Each structure stands twice: as structure tokens, then as C-alpha cells.
Amino acid sequence: MAEVLGPEKYAPAHLREPEQRSGAPRPAYPHNQRNQALLSENLNATIQRIASVSMDEIDRLIHSLEDVRGLMRTEGERISREIAGYASLSYSAVATMKVMADSIKEWKGGPDKTATSEP
């Protein structure tokens, strides 16, 4: 290969033509490496932005579901208390009705009935 003469010989490396080597791969241009680094950084930033939006949405969904779970738990406890109160009230009503029925039986079969049937 002929020796380079003139200003090309003294030009900065990034402005010179790459040397041709037989059978060897050509070295990468420095500006290509910079472009690749910038592309890589842009891609990483885009992925992080998308991931953070997705993660924020997932966090909001989890908090909403936790709120619903808490509401369901407290409502379940309240309904259990209500059912226990109704069961107790029903039991009391049945017991009261038995007492009243027994009192009415005694009143109907009491001394007044025997006094009127003896003439």
C-alpha cells in the first residue's frame, strides 16, 4: 500500500480514511460508536419510562384492590353482626310468644271457666 503524503497524513484520526487491511475487519468509526451509545441510552430511557408507567399503574391497581378488600372485610363483619342480632331478636320473639301462649292457655282454662260451668 502506498504511503499517504500530504495533509491527510497529519489529519486527526477521526477525519482520516480508515486503512484497508487485507482480510482483517475494518475498525468501527468513532462516530458510529457514539451513535450506538446514544441509541442505547435512548432505548434504555424509553424502556425505563414505559416500565415506570406500567409499574405505577400496577401499584394503583394493587392499592385499589386492597381498599376493596378492606371494605369487603368490614362489610362482612357488619353483616355477621346484623345476622347475629336478627337471630337473637327472632329467638327472643319466639320465647315471648311461647310465654304469651302459655299465659293465654292458663287464662282460658283458669278458675272463671270452672265457676261458670257449675250451675
Image (cartoon, helix red, strand yellow):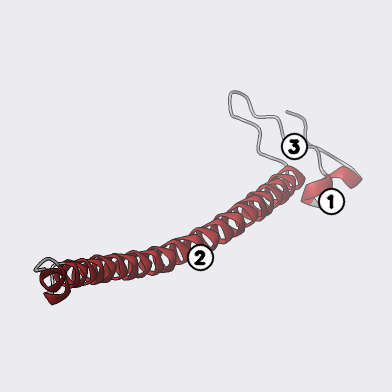
Specify the amino acid type for callout 1: Tyr
Question: Which label sits on residue 18?
Answer: 3
Q: Nearer the viewer, residue 21 or 103?
A: 103
Q: Which residue is mark 1?
A: 10
Q: Residue at x 86, y 40 (%)?
A: 5
Q: CA distance from mark 1 to mark 3?
A: 14 Å
- State which mark lies toward you, 2 or 3: 2
Toward the top, the furthest residue is: 23
Q: CA distance from mark 2 to mark 3?
A: 65 Å
Residue 23's x, y, as percent? 58, 23
- For label 3, the crowd category at 10 Å Cα-Cα, with few meaning under 14, some 14 to 19 and many 20 or more, is few
Q: Residue at x 21, y 66 (%)?
A: 101
Say what secondary structure mark 3 lies in.
loop
Specify the amino acid type for callout 3: Pro
- State which mark lies toward you, 2 or 1: 2
Q: Which residue is mark 2?
A: 67
Q: Is 6 situated left or right of 87 in this image?
A: right
Q: Nearer the viewer, residue 107 or 10?
A: 107
Q: Quadrant of the N terminus?
A: top right
Q: Is 20 situated left or right of 82 in this image?
A: right
In terms of sequence position, does the residue under pointer 1 or pointer 3 come before the other? 1
Specify the amino acid type for callout 2: Asp
Residue 55's x, y, as percent? 57, 56
Q: Is residue 61 above or below residue 28?
A: below
